[in-house]
Image (cartoon, rainbow, N blue to C red):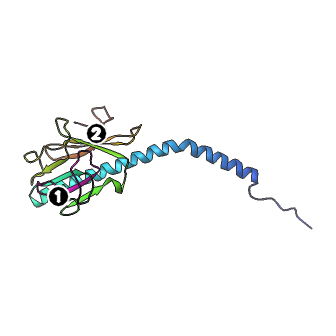
């Protein structure tokens, strides 16, 4: 006796409907996904800078000597100091690393490693552009050599609805990341400077 076989699987029409629905969902999610990715790039660069600043302070304490964190244009021998630099170097002493970023550094990074669409703006307490901060052997910020940067603002290029982040450096040497969009005084993410 023959049994009728049951049909299994999708028909061509069911497959096309499924693909159409998935395409609509992906098209709706793509702009949000792009914003999310850009925010991750900003955060990645901010965390690298924060880590380099903490390394500079820790090395200053460990070596009991001045250590300098500088924003630079790149990590080659042709580097220049820049308050908008997307690369950074940590060097022992107070001497400018300009022109020697590829040698004699403790640590360093370039935004090209993580995010090329991130903009950087570093300023001192008077809102003047600064490219360096020097930590003393006690871990304090010293301004005897160069005016010290107090905050670094990281944003996206081109500007949009992306999340800005800011790194603050206190005279006592504390380094922290904050969110300039937060305005509630009791929120720990609030920026002080």
Residue in front for this viewpoint, 144 or 62: 144
Query: How many badges with numbers are in the image?
Result: 2
Q: Work out how far the residue at label 1 is from the one at label 2, CA to CA, in angstroms.
A: 31 Å
Q: Please state if 39 lies on the left or on the right of 70 as rendered.
A: right
Instruction: Tell me which secondary structure the magenta stretch mostly adopts.
Output: loop
- Residue at image point 26% right, 50% down: 50
The quadrant of the picture occupied by the N terminus is bottom right
Query: Does the magenta run of residues contain 51?
Result: no
Q: Secondary structure at mark 2?
A: loop
Q: Please state if 137 lies on the left or on the right of 127 as rendered.
A: left
- Residue at image point 66% right, 46% down: 20
Count neighbours of disc 1 (C-alpha within 10 A) and say few if under 14, some if 14 to 19, many if 20 or more. many
Residue 95, located in which quarter of the rendered image? Answer: bottom left
Label 2: which residue?
188
Q: 114 above or below 184?
A: below
Residue 148 screen position, x and y as percent: 15, 44
Label 1: which residue?
91
- Residue at image point 41% right, 46% down: 38
Residue 177 screen position, x and y as percent: 27, 44
Q: Please state if 107 lies on the left or on the right of 113 as rendered.
A: left
Residue 134 screen position, x and y as percent: 14, 50
* Nearest-to-viewer mark from 1 and 2: 1
Start-end of magenta stretch = 77-96
Q: Looking at the rendered structure, which numbered label has been put on residue 8?
A: none
First in residue order: circle 1 vs circle 2: 1
Residue 69 screen position, x and y as percent: 19, 52
**Seen from this angle, which residue lies furthest bottom?**
1
Query: Does the magenta run of residues contain 82?
Result: yes
The quadrant of the picture occupied by the C terminus is top left
């Amino acid at each position: 006796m023959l049994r009728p076989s049951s049909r299994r699987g999708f028909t061509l029409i069911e497959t096309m409907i499924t693909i159409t629905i998935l395409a609509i969902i992906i098209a709706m999610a793509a702009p949000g996904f792009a914003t999310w990715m850009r925010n991750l790039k900003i955060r990645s660069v901010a965390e690298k800078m924060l880590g380099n600043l903490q390394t500079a302070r820790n090395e200053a304490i460990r070596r009991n000597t001045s250590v300098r964190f500088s924003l630079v244009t790149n990590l080659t021998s042709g580097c220049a100091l820049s308050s908008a630099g997307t690369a950074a170097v940590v060097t022992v002493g107070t001497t400018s690393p300009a022109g020697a970023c590829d040698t004699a550094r403790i640590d360093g990074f370039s935004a090209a490693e993580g995010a090329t669409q991130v903009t950087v703006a570093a300023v001192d307490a008077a809102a003047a552009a600064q490219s360096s901060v020097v930590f003393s052997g006690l871990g304090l910020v010293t301004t005897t050599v160069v005016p010290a940067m107090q905050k670094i603002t990281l944003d996206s290029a081109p500007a949009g609805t992306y999340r800005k982040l800011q790194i603050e450096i206190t005279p006592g040497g504390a380094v922290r990341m904050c969110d300039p969009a937060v305005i509630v005084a009791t929120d720990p993410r609030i920026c002080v400077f």
